[in-house]
Image (cartoon, rainbow, N blue to C red):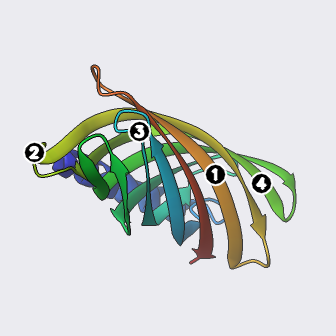
Amino acid sequence: MKTLLIATTAAALALSGAVAANAQDVGQVYGSVGYQGTQNDTTDTNVNGINARIGTRLTPYFGIEGEAALGTDSDKGPGGEYKLTNKVAAYGVGFLPVSPRFDLIGRVGVSDTDLKAPAAAGKLEQGTALEYGVGAQYHFDNDLALRADYTKADFNGDKGEAGTTSVSLIKKF
């Protein structure tokens, strides 16, 4: 599943580059690095991580982005310590410019998440989730912005839900 998500994201970004070549104002590419905290309802834990995103605006109001995250700490849950191993995701993103420096954001996508679980449980693959969230970003200038968002993950089957809050620094290219 991770390979499919990565391939889909790469193909979408490549296609968006082709679209960008045909329209001067469309195709703004950005990358970000941020810190995130996730409350996992399945394991009743709070785990943190570092995320990286790359995306592009296909229009002034719609874009796509890919995300990858790695865990930075663990939390005690049922049976022992849990830690985010990795997460990959792809999203469609809606932008609502409120002012020249401030955007509201909505995003919907799909993710694949793995957690390191206690030795008795082994590797816990939470698997594929439908993700949706909201946020805002403030542009310091034409190249740098600060973004805060909240994204909810609904995992397939009976694997529960998780909510992630993140703060990221964005650099436009």
In the image, what residue type sits under mark 2?
Ala
Mark 4 or 1: in front is: 1
Tag 2, which secondary structure?
loop
Q: Position of residue 39 (x, y in %)?
A: 48, 44
Q: Residue 120 shows which numbered tag?
A: 2
Q: Would you say 118 lies left or right of 16 here?
A: left
In the image, what residue type sits under mark 3?
Asp
In front of the other: 52 or 77: 77
Tag 4, which secondary structure?
strand
Going from N to C along the chain, the mark reached first, 4 or 2, is 4
Q: In which quarter of the image is the N terminus?
A: top left
Mark 3 or 4: in front is: 3
- C-alpha span from label 3 to label 4: 33 Å
- C-alpha span from label 2 to label 1: 34 Å
- C-alpha span from label 4 to label 1: 12 Å
In front of the other: 112 or 101: 112
Q: How crowded is mark 1: few (under 14 residues within 10 Å), some or many (20 or more)?
A: some
